[in-house]
Every structure is written in C-alpha cells, then in structure tokens.
Image (spheres, rainbow, N blue to C red):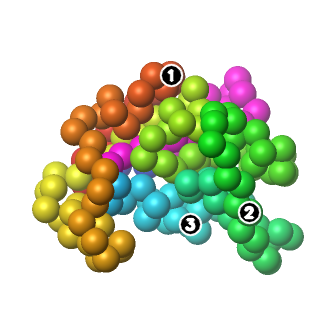
Amino acid sequence: MHEYTFLDQLNNICMDLLKHKDRLIICIAGKPGAGKSTLGKNIRKNGFGNFSKYSISVIDDSVMSIDLFYIFNKRIKIKTTKEDELMPFIKLLPKRKKLIFCVTAQPFKKITFTDILILLEIKDETERINRLVLRDGKFPSRHFSNSEQLIGDLKYDYLINVEL
C-alpha cells in the first residue's frame, strides 16, 4: 500500500496550479538545521511525482544549480541585499523549468509571494542544534522561536507543514 506523503500532496497541488500557470515558485522554509537544503538537493537530483529533475530548479540561499544540455551542471551565485523576486535567476532558466524552489530560512528577504510554502519543522530541537554544530562547527548564533520569524509577511496560496 502506498503511503501518502507530503511530496504526493505537493505533486497534486503543482499539477493543479500548472493548469493555469506556466511556472511555479515553491518556497522551502524552516529553522537552520531543519533539513531545507537536504530536501532541496534531493528534489533537484531526483525530482518527485510527475516532475523530473529536468523540470525543476532549486535556488538555495542565492545559489542555483542548473543542468546544461542534460549532462553538465553549473552553479550560479547571485548575491543581493534586497528582495529581488528571484529575477536574476528566473531570467536565466529555460522554459522547461516548471518548478522553481527557493530554499532559505527567511524567504521574505528574497520574495514577497510564493505559490506554495513548505514549512519544515523538526521535532527534536537537540537534533537540530547537533546538525548545526556538525555543519558549522559551532553553536548557532541565530535563534528563531516561531514560524512568523521565518516567513515574515510572505504571501502564499498553499501551505504544507512538514514535521521531521
């Protein structure tokens, strides 16, 4: 028996929205160490549901990996200090890229609207802190106490809460 996962839910929402739009912005937000980049990397490498990796682009904290000619992968980094609605990246994407994932702890600093917001929450705060110490070699300097600090005034059509 197939277990219905949040990726199934995401697939269904994307399929429905793409009936009316050419491209979707999907934001993955969560506290540092919650697994945002890991999820984004997995989606970029494997795709999900009806979407192959060739129809997906992932922008993770101002770095985008794009495939060139289905063989080569290039990383593009564009740093901005203001909201840019991902425009520097979007204008570089081929039309076959239907899903653009924006992976960041504070999406409102990059965008004002997303079609779908995936909010990752980790059950075990100690595990999250340990991940950050392993990754960064130090205790995290930033602390987010709630989701409102993560998403600010970001507007979205769909919200998917994922508890890890």
80 above or below 129? above
Whether tag 3 and tag 1 are in contact, CB under 8 A, the answer is no
Give the quarter of the figure containing the C terminus.
Answer: bottom left
Q: Nearer the viewer, mark 3 or mark 1?
A: 1
Q: Is residue 16 magenta?
A: yes
| SS at badge 2 | strand
On the image, numbered disc 2 is attached to which residue?
Answer: 76
**Residue type for callout 2:** Ile
* Residue 125, disc: none
- Quadrant of res 146: top left
Q: Nearer the viewer, mark 3 or mark 2?
A: 2
On the image, numbered disc 3 is attached to which residue?
Answer: 46
* Residue 155, disc: 1
Mark toward the start of the polypeptide (1 vs 2): 2
Give the quarter of the figure containing the N terminus.
Answer: bottom left
Q: Provide residue 144's location: percent of width, then percent of height.
A: 27, 42
**Residue type for callout 1:** Lys
Q: CA distance from mark 1 to mark 2?
A: 26 Å
User: Which residue sits at x=41%, y=27%?
Assistant: 152
| SS at badge 1 | strand
Q: Nearer the viewer, mark 1 or mark 2?
A: 2
Q: Residues within 10 Å of mark 1 (few under 14, many from 20)?
A: some
Is residue 44 something that shows in the picture? yes
Magenta residues, as a range?
10-31
Q: Residues within 10 Å of mark 3 (few under 14, many from 20)?
A: some
